[in-house]
Structures are given as structure tokens and as C-alpha cells.
Amino acid sequence: SLTGSNCQIPGFVLRTLRTGRYLPSPVGRSRPAPYSSIPLLVAPMTRVTSGRSRPTAFLASLRRFLSWRHRGGRLTILVVGSATLGVIGWSGNPLTLPMAMVFPALWSVAGSRAGAALVAAAYFLGASRGLPEGVSIFFGSDRLLGIALWVTASLVFVGTHAACWTKRSGWRQPWRYLLANVLMSVPPLGILGWANPITAAGIMLPGWGWWGLAMTMVLLMSSVSTRLRWLAIAVIGALSISASMNWTEPAPPSSWRGIDTSFVTGREQYADYAQQRVTIHLVQAAAVDGAKVVVLPESAFGIWTPTAEALWSGALANFQVTVIGGAIILAGDGYENLMISVTAKGAEVLYRQRMPVPVSMWQPWSTGGAAADFFGNPVVEHTG
């Protein structure tokens, strides 16, 4: 029940109660307004009203926190959005890759260097989320090692983008992002420069070559510009929609066959003689079926030696087929990861790996790792 009582309150409080706003005394009045007498109603707080106010207050606080004007809320939105761009953009579907190009816009409005680091970390960790599982499978260890390498690899990307971030508007932000992108595209930092948004150039502007790469960089730089940000995002969206509407799945030539093997081997165990014979039978069956070129997975040839070459060339003597697959060649201080083409006439090296996976394969601080051919030819052309 409600109880009433009379009390004396100042006039400015009375005006506040009547209007819902604080109204000070009129100008020129040197003394407070005379006291007025009104009934003051006091409602006791019950469990019912208390229970109803708590969720309402919580939602109101959450709404204020997630407001763009709230610094912490704005940073939370940017971090979640950046992680979403990394996960969806690098999901394996080429049509979602242009979403990664929005990352620079979120990075530019982080508000502080620490905020820019968090936004960059969310994007990179989301994009490279498969690394812990891959490392655990490769090394045959638990996820902790994979998580450690995952976080360690992100430090280069995060540190570079945090160092290049600036709060100043104008031309400085676009050029700072260009610097960050270039640093993460070429060695030595580019060795860990995964998930670069400029990769979407091949999806949005296919066939444009270097011009397409340059136009994509201009769009990325414009997306961090205060004046051109929304225009750049609109153009990225339009190009993404156009790419989706005109997309056609790449189809291999009818005379090409790809064989996906499923041999179970441990780390540092390569194809032995029995596995080689099974693979040869698979290739011969594909050749009988009309294949002119057969593509095998990485390391399908195992350790490549003159003996292995003689084995494969002899097995293909009665077949007009070319076999392309992965192999390694042992060297004095490690090994080379190669792509080899084999026919009945012999074998030749088509490609030497430019950048083996750091730590697991490329180990420049020790011996026994894979060699890196940084400036080797990245394109292989084959007629078949």
C-alpha cells in the first residue's frame, strides 16, 4: 500500500518533480525559492517490482555499453565484426573472400593503437583458426602446441598493424595501411603474412592481372579514408555481387584426373615400395579410363631418387600419360619440397616450393628443414 506524508521541499525540487527536468531559480533571485508543501508518496520496494527492474536495468546498461558512442562498446563491436570477417571471409568459399576487404575499415576506426591491435588480432585469429588442428595432426601432438603456434604467428600481423595505425585523419591513414599491407606481403614479415585482404583481387577482378591488384589496393586504402570509406565499401560490395553473379566453377580438362589417396603414415614417414605400387596401379587405371594427365597429392612420390624414377618410368612404359605429384629430394642440410612430372621417358622438376610452412617445415635456424625458394617461378604451365 502507498503511504502519504507532508514535507517541506525547496521550490526547484518541486519544479523538477512537476516537469521531469531540473529548472534552476530564475535569474536575479538571490535567495532560494520559498518552500512549498506537497504530499510526498513513498512506495515500498517489493520483491515483484525489484525482480522486474533488474533485467530492465541490465538491458539498459547493455544497450548503453554497446552504443557506438561508448568507447568499450564500440571496440567490442569492432572486435566481433573483425573476427566475423576473418571466419567467413576465409571459410574456403571463394565468393566470401571479398568480405575480408572490409577489415581495414574496422581497423582504421579502432580509436587507439591498443584497439587496433585487438581488431587485427580478432581478424587474424579468425582467419587462421584451422592452424591449431593442422599443427596437432602434423606433429602428432595435442592442441596446446597448435594454439601456441597460432597465437605466436598472429603477433607479427598484430604488431605490424598496431605500429602502422594512426589516429590522424586525411592522407596519413591510407598510406599507413599501404605500409602495413606491403610489410605483410614480402619477406621477412610476409612469411607469416596470411589472410591478406588483397587476395580478394583475383575474385573481384579476375583476369585483370597487375591492374586488378593495383585497383584492389586503391579500394583498401580508400576504405580507411574518412571521406571515401563508405564509397569504397559500396564499390567492394558491388564488385562482390558482380563476382557472385558471374562466377563459374573452374572445371579441369576432360583428359585430366585427380587422385586423392588416403594412406595412413606418421610424421617423417614417406611412401615405401608397397605404397608406390598401389599408387602406380591407381594411375594405370586412370590411364586406361582415358586420362592423359594424372595429378597426385603432395608427397605422393615420397623421397625421389633415381631408383624411384626408374620404377615409375618403367610402370608407365605402355601408357601415354603424364603423372604430376609431390616429392622431396634430400640435401645436405635438409630437403627440397618439389612438384615433379613423370612420363615413360623420365622425370623433370616443375616447381620448387617457394615458402614452406614455418616451424613445421621451414627451419632456417637449424638443419633438417625444407628449403625455401623465395623468388622461384610461382606459375607452372603444362599442356595435356
Image: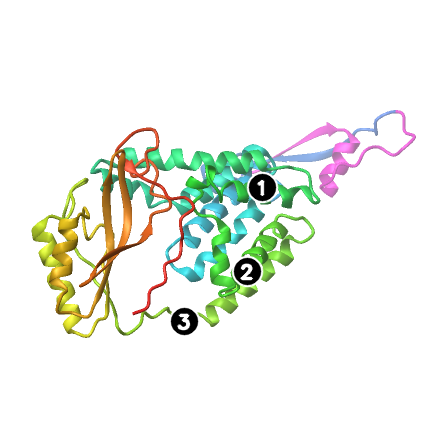
- Of marks 3 and 2, which one's residue comes earlier in the chain? 2
**In front here: 17 or 163?**
163
3 and 2 marks in contact (CB < 8 Å): no
Residue type of the residue flagged with mark 1:
Leu
Q: Nearer the viewer, mark 3 or mark 2?
A: 2
1 and 3 marks in contact (CB < 8 Å): no
Q: Is residue 193 left or right of residue 11?
A: left
**Image x and y of residue 232, in percent:** 61, 57
Q: Which mark is residue 212?
A: 2
Report crowding for label 1: few under 14, some 14 to 19, many 20 or more residues within 10 A (C-alpha).
some
Q: Is residue 72 above or below residue 200?
A: above
Q: Is residue 140 above or below residue 249?
A: above
Report crowding for label 2: few under 14, some 14 to 19, many 20 or more residues within 10 A (C-alpha).
some
- State the residue at coordinates (40%, 36%): 153
Q: In terms of image quadrants, where is residue 37?
A: top right
Q: Disc 1 marks which residue?
A: 179
**Image x and y of residue 108, in percent:** 60, 43
